[in-house]
């Protein structure tokens, strides 16, 4: 398990299942502060044909975080052999609107809102 933790949030990568689980509130300032998370996603995607991002426990993600996710999806869609799945929660308001936009960026993305 690879973890990135700070006050208020935690991002964990389980390489065996190639799933990245986000929890808490992400309010980092700018793409530079999101770089460790971005690097983790890029590495996980490069090392497998499929990657799951589980955002169900992510209560808040600011605009810089949404930009980071969008940038990741735009990069991932360049390799048509990759399957990206995003799992969100219908109980967290920002996820319904923002995660649907990821589907627009990568039509092959599997979006699960539970």
Image (cartoon, rainbow, N blue to C red):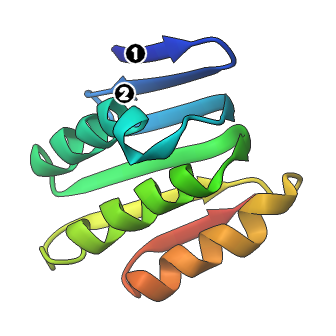
**Relative to 111, 35 lies left or right:** left
**Label 1: how many residues lie within 10 Å, few (<14), some (14-19) or many (20+)?**
some
Q: Quadrant of residue 111?
A: bottom right
Image x and y of residue 7, in percent = 64, 11
In the image shown, does 51 or 105 lie closer to the viewer?
105
Image x and y of residue 64, in percent = 53, 52
100 above or below 21?
A: below
24 above or below 68?
A: above
* Circle 2 or circle 1, nearest the eye: 1
How far is mark 2 from mark 1, CA to CA? 6 Å
Any part of residue 21 in sight: yes
Residue at numbered disc 2: 13
Q: Residue at x 14, y 48 (%)?
A: 48
Asked whether the beta carbons under mark 2 and mark 1 sit within 8 Å of each other, the answer is yes
**Label 2: how many residues lie within 10 Å, few (<14), some (14-19) or many (20+)?**
many
Q: Residue at x 63, y 78 (%)?
A: 100
Q: The residue tagged with tag 1: helix, strand or loop?
A: strand
Q: Residue at x 24, y 76 (%)?
A: 77
Quadrant placement of the N terminus: top left
Q: Earlier in the sequence, mark 2 or mark 1?
A: 1
Quadrant placement of the C terminus: bottom right
Residue at numbered disc 1: 3
């Amino acid at each position: 398990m690879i973890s990135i933790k700070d006050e208020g949030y935690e991002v964990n990568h389980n390489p065996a299942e190639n799933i990245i689980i986000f929890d808490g509130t992400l309010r980092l300032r700018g793409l530079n502060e999101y770089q460790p998370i971005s690097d983790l996603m890029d590495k996980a995607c490069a090392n497998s044909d499929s990657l799951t991002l589980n955002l169900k426990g992510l209560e808040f993600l600011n605009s810089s975080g949404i930009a980071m996710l969008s940038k990741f999806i735009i990069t991932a869609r360049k390799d048509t052999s990759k399957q990206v799945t995003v799992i969100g929660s219908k109980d967290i308001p920002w996820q319904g609107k923002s995660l649907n936009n990821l589907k627009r960026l990568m039509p092959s993305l599997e979006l699960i809102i539970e």
